[in-house]
Amino acid sequence: MYRAQMRHSLFVLVVFFAATAGAQDYAFKIRGDTSGVPRGCSARASIRALDDWFDAFNTADSAKLDQATSPRFGFSRGSFARTEGFFVARDIRTLTRYVRSRAVQHERMQIQEVTFNRWRSRGLQFGPIYFLRSATDLGSRPLPGIGKGEVVCGEGMHILNLARRPSFDPGPKQ
């Protein structure tokens, strides 16, 4: 049994690296299992969609954010500071307003590492995703974050739930 699991894990790892070979280099580590890709989809395009979403957020580019976000989506962000409450957006107008308000605070989220957890239908699941969040109203040091979500093939970010990383979580693997 153990050997079969090891063979499967090695196969998934080889398939993952073959699928992403030649892809652009990302500033974050990519781990996990991207097997089960549906026809017409690719791990490479989904990784790019994830990266595009964070780039659109960081630059407060509403047109790119709209392109990088699935028509039916859910976004939530937990509190990172005492002055900040929980935030949820389920439509692009609310999300765009939020992103613009955070741009005033020079907010940036930098992905450190993402672990993929296979395809389910046309969605590539991921989590944990580790990132650093910084903004002028959050203090002088970037705050560690953690999240999970799903990128839908050909649509973009479908689900993204983010929160401050708890102290018991060791964070990205070295």
Image (cartoon, rainbow, N blue to C red):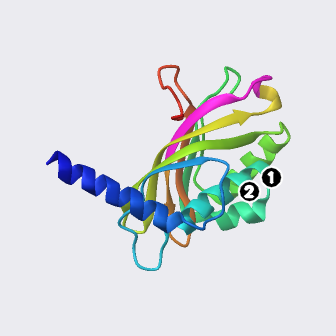
**Magenta-span inclusion, residue 30:** no
Find residue 26 and report its horizontal and vertical position in percent. 65, 54
Disc assigned to residue 98: none
In the figure, residue 35 lies in which quadrant? bottom left
Find residue 8 and report its horizontal and vertical position in percent. 27, 57
**Magenta-span inclusion, residue 140:** yes
Q: Closer to the camera, 93 or 115?
A: 115
Disc 2 and disc 1 in contact, CB within 8 angstroms? yes
- The residues bearing labels 2 and 1 have C-alpha atoms spaced at a distance of 5 Å
**Segment tinted magenta in the rendering:** 138-148
Residue at coordinates 70% horizontally, 57% vertically from top-left? 93
Mark 2 closeness class: few <14, some 14–19, many ≥20 residues within 10 Å: some
Residue at coordinates 73% horizontally, 46% vertically from top-left? 98
| Residue farthest to the bottom, as pictured | 40
Give amino acid for label 2.
Ala
Disc assigned to residue 56: 2
Find residue 44 and report its horizontal and vertical position in percent. 55, 66
Find residue 127 and report its horizontal and vertical position in percent. 46, 45
User: Is 129 on the left or on the right of 132, as rendered?
Assistant: left
Mark 1 closeness class: few <14, some 14–19, many ≥20 residues within 10 Å: some
Q: Say which element carries label 2.
A: helix
Q: Closer to the camera, 47 or 78?
A: 47
Which residue was labeled with disc 1? 59
Tell me the quadrant of the picture where the C terminus can be found. Answer: top right
| In the image, residue 23 above or below residue 111 | below
